[in-house]
Image (cartoon, rainbow, N blue to C red):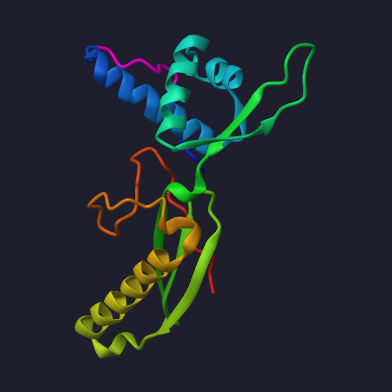
Amino acid sequence: MREQIPENPEPNGESPSQRKAYRLALIRYFVWREGPVARAQIAESLGLNLPTVSNCVGELLSSRDLVEEGYADSTGGRKPQLLDINEKKGSVIGLTFSSRGISSAWADLKGQLYNIRIYPFDFSLGPTAALETLKQAVAEQIDAVRLTPPCRADLPNRGGAFGSRGHALWDIARLPSF
């Protein structure tokens, strides 16, 4: 079950830059979970005013964290622009362990799995062999992420463990059982 989005989007006692960073992260997370969504829906759902949402969305569009994804149906006025997470902005490498071995894959930020692999492994071979198999699985997924054209140009090296852009408010995606 997913965690609830915090009710109070403004942490008390924080500096203006910390509050702004929190709002940007909260909006990014909301759009990732609920997108595509309109600015008005973001404002209403998160309890923020529309100018604040519009300013934050402008920054998130400039940084290419969000993308514009068409228009919603009109309710009488202008059609609202829909926003969604930029799935090419980052990736996640996932590993699972089972009696059949180590499974690995990588996913874009919309959860589309790529390069699903199973590395057969006998756990009786001990921890050193397990770590070597794990190291091989991770290395091959890193190489796969780097070689995938739609993501490579949008994945600047941010010094993360796998060179991908992560965010503390994103859910953990689970690999399917094999």
Residue extent of the magenta highlight: 5-12
Q: In x, y percent, where is residue 153?
A: 41, 54
Image vertical order of residue 77 relative to residue 41, above or below: above
Name the residue located 39 percent from the left edge and 70 percent from the top edge: 141
Residue at the extreme right: 76
Q: Is residue 133 left or right of residue 90?
A: left
Residue 121 sits inside the magenta stretch: no
Name the residue located 72 percent from the left edge and 20 percent from the top edge: 79
Q: Is residue 138 left or right of residue 151?
A: left
Q: In x, y percent, where is residue 25?
A: 38, 30
Image vertical order of residue 11 relative to residue 111, above or below: above
Q: Is residue 88 left or right of residue 63?
A: right
Name the residue located 54 percent from the left edge and 49 percent from the top edge: 110
Image vertical order of residue 10 relative to residue 145, above or below: above
| Residue 4 or residue 15, whichever sits in front | 15
Name the residue located 41 percent from the left edge and 63 percent from the top edge: 94
| Residue 43 or residue 9, whichever sits in front | 43
